[in-house]
Every structure is written in structure tokens, then in C-alpha cells.
Image (cartoon, rainbow, N blue to C red):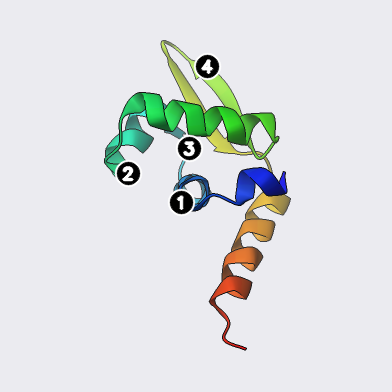
Amino acid sequence: MFDALSDVARLRTLMLLADNNLSVSEIAAAEEEKITTVSARLQVLHAARLIERQREGKSVIYRIADDHVLTLVRNAIAHAAERH
């Protein structure tokens, strides 16, 4: 899990999903990246059980797996931002 959290782009994606359930194309548009790049990132996050996916019609919607994941990510970001 912590390997998945070690990448800034994956953290950015998790923070996007903190507020919304999104498809890969919506995430790619928000991050101004290629769908293939975002899709690979989502695979890593899903394999680490940090996000879940659900098919809705022709789309797959991604969301944070649970509140513990969101708390972990927010605490990690806050800790990294502290000056010692």
C-alpha cells in the first residue's frame, strides 16, 4: 500500500477521488493527462486496495475504497507539509 502512496501523481488522483466518484476519462481531463497514463495509475491504486471500481453502463467509475484510506492520505500529506 505504501508503495502505491509514494507517487505524487497517485496521491493527486486519490485527492480527486476524495470529493467525487469519477471515470478514467474524467480523471484524465482533470489532470490533463492521457487516459492510458491515468489508467495505469488507477491499476496500481486498485491493486493496493486504495480505490474501488464499479461499472455503470459503459463506464467504470472509481472511488476511494473507504474512509480509512482518505484519512491516511490526508494525514500523510499534512505530515509532509509540516516543517520541523
Earlier sequence position, callout 1 versus callout 4: 1
- Mark 2 and mark 4 lie on one chain; the one further toward the N terminus is 2
> Which kind of residue does numbered mark 4 sit on?
Arg
Circles 1, 2 touching at the beta carbon (< 8 Å): yes
Task: Provide the residue designation for mark 2.
Answer: 31
Q: Which mark is residue 55?
A: 4
Name which quarter of the figure residue 37 lies in.
Answer: top left
* 10 in relation to 51, above or below: below
Query: Taking the image as drawn, is residue 23 in sight?
Result: no
Q: For label 3, count other residues whose C-alpha is less than 10 Å away and answer few (under 14), some (14-19) or many (20+).
A: some
Q: Is residue 73 above or below residue 25?
A: below
Which amino acid, by three-letter code, is at mark 2? Glu
| Mark 1 vs mark 4, CA separation in Å | 23 Å
Q: Earlier in the sequence, mark 1 or mark 2?
A: 1
**Local crowd at mark 4 within 10 Å, few (<14), some, or many (≥20)?**
few
Q: Secondary structure at mark 3?
A: loop
| Label ID, residue 21 | 3
Residue 12 is marked as 1
From the viewer's perspective, is the residue at label 1 or at label 3 nearer? Answer: 1
Mark in the foreground, 1 or 4:
1
Residue sitting at the far top: 58
Assign a secondary structure to mark 1: helix
In the shown orientation, is residue 21 left or right of residue 47? left
First reached walking from the N terminus: tag 3 or tag 2: 3
Residue type beneath disc 3: Asn
Mark 3 touching mark 4, by CB under 8 A?
no
Q: Residue at x 48, y 37 (%)?
A: 21
